[in-house]
Amino acid sequence: MTNEKPLENAKFLCIIDLRHRQTDSAQSKRARKGQTMNALQTTSRGEVALTDETLYNSFLEYLDVRPKSVETYRTAIRQFLKYLIENNIKNPTRQDIIDYRDHLKKDHKPNTVQNYLTAVKLFFAWMEQQGIYKDVAGHVKGVKISKEHKKGYLTQYQSRHLLESVDTSTTTGKRDYALIGLLITTGLRTVEVERANVGDIETIGGFTALFVQGKGRDEKAEYVKIAGPVEDAIRVYLRSRSEKKAEKTEPLFASTSNNNRGERMTTRSIRRIVKDRLIDAGYDSDMLTAHSMRHTAATLNLLSGGTLEETQQLLRHQNISTTMIYSHALERAKNASEDRIATGLFS
């Protein structure tokens, strides 16, 4: 999601007329409404002034989600309030929500539109629950999101070329080489790399493993195997990063910028590093991103004889149907129908 300008500078207030709220005679709901309303600014006509620090903050406090998810919802709600303010919409209707959805479609990808719309739907559902405003977004349809394989992947040759293109004479280069090598061979998500600490590397039996806190997990219970060359690259990087032995609680991959040297990298910085290295290696495509390294790991494993079950375990998919997307993508790539037709026509 893109960063929006703070609404503190907004010249307008978005007013929600309480006359449009859903009537509710239940005493418990009136009590909840009263608690929420006490925290909100109201006009002389009994309307709620929807500013950046009132109603939507109450909504965010209500959410029982992780801190990162709260920030995602915060950005989405700010985007929606900005739209209401710019269009002078004081009493949103179902049609306003539909128009907002269509407005988002112009400049955002389907996944982003769906995320923004989900936040708005939850927002209005919460307001109805609190007895503040009718849920006008509940039955607005979302956008169709394709389940097909949408990101590209690198071939074995391209993967090798990408790694070889990294100048490892500097600490930054050593870090990026180890980072990309780890992503390609393990299929880790960027958030899993962000959370990784030096102490998460352990020896299990006859191999070295990195314990990871997976998507939606609260602890580091799963692990990926670190291949020998990648382990060597990581240890070379860690020695280059500091003369003293790294503490177990230190981030596995740290920033080398002047402002944040030694601090944990964010998922955004990890994605930027991988994207910059891809471009430097000559792979400048919208289809190739940091997440493409995960697709590359799955694809190379399948092409090298790995089974669907092994690939599912590698990527830690809960449902094998998710892993099958990669198999279907490979089958389509191998399908030579177009070539056969062209051969018949032009030979």
Image (cartoon, rainbow, N blue to C red):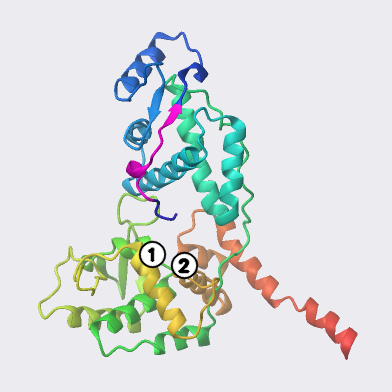
The three-letter code of the residue at mark 1 reads Thr
Which residue is the site of mark 1? 190
Residue in the foreground of this view, choosing between 227 and 88: 88
Which label's residue is closer to the chain start, 1 or 2?
Answer: 1
Q: Secondary structure at mark 1?
A: helix
Span shown in magenta: 5-15
- Label 1 close to label 2 by CB (< 8 Å): yes
The three-letter code of the residue at mark 2 reads His
Identify the residue at horizontal 41%, vertical 77% (top origin).
276
Q: Secondary structure at mark 2?
A: loop
Identify the residue at horizontal 36%, vertical 34% (top origin).
51
Q: Position of residue 103 (x, y in %)?
A: 58, 47
Seen as rendered, the residue at the extreme left is 244
Check if residue 7 falls in the magenta segment. yes
Q: Quadrant of residue 262?
A: bottom left
Marker disc for residue 291: 2
